[in-house]
Amino acid sequence: MYYTIKRPLVTEKNSLLAEQGIFVFEVDKAASKIEIKKAVEKFFRVKVASVKTAVCRNKARRTRMGTSKVRYWKKAMVKLAPGQKISLFEGV
């Protein structure tokens, strides 16, 4: 269950979303919304209102040998219930 969440995605855009109660994580490609919801609730001890997912891809890199393969990854935008927050995204 803990392997569904790979890492938090901390960017400027995601910091603005965190103020609205939406937190973004890189998750396993095979993880479903229900699995992501259970993992976030268990790991961070918060109540999740909804989960949105998107499959993203990196740009292909050109090298002198040709182009590299495109790496696909999945991100999850987790909206928490009102009054809930994750302290991991706050500046320490």
Image (cartoon, grey):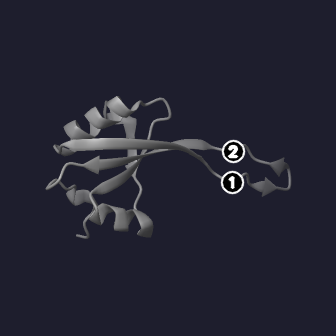
Percent position of residue 32, x then y: 41, 30
Percent position of residue 49, x then y: 25, 43
Structural crowding at the residue carrying mark 2, measured as other residues with C-alpha within 10 Å and reported as few (<14), some (14–19) or many (≥20): few
Mark 2–mark 1 distance (CA, rounded to whole Å): 6 Å
Left or right of 20: which side holds 58?
right
Percent position of residue 91, x then y: 26, 70
Structural crowding at the residue carrying mark 1, measured as other residues with C-alpha within 10 Å and reported as few (<14), some (14–19) or many (≥20): few
Percent position of residue 1, x then y: 31, 30
Q: Residue at x 45, y 36 (%)?
A: 28
Indicate which disc, 2 or 1, sits on the residue closer to the N terminus.
1
Q: Residue at x 43, y 31 (%)?
A: 31
Q: Are marks 2 and 1 in contact (CB under 8 Å)?
A: yes
Which numbered disc covers residue 70?
A: 2
The residue pinned by badge 1 equals: 59
Residue 27 in which image quadrant: top left
Q: Quadrant of the C terminus?
A: bottom left
Secondary structure of the residue carrying numbered label 1? loop
Q: Against 57, is 35 above or below?
A: above
Q: Residue at x 31, y 42 (%)?
A: 50
Q: Nearer the viewer, residue 49 or 18?
A: 49
Q: Residue at x 80, y 49 (%)?
A: 67
Q: Amino acid at mark 1?
A: Lys
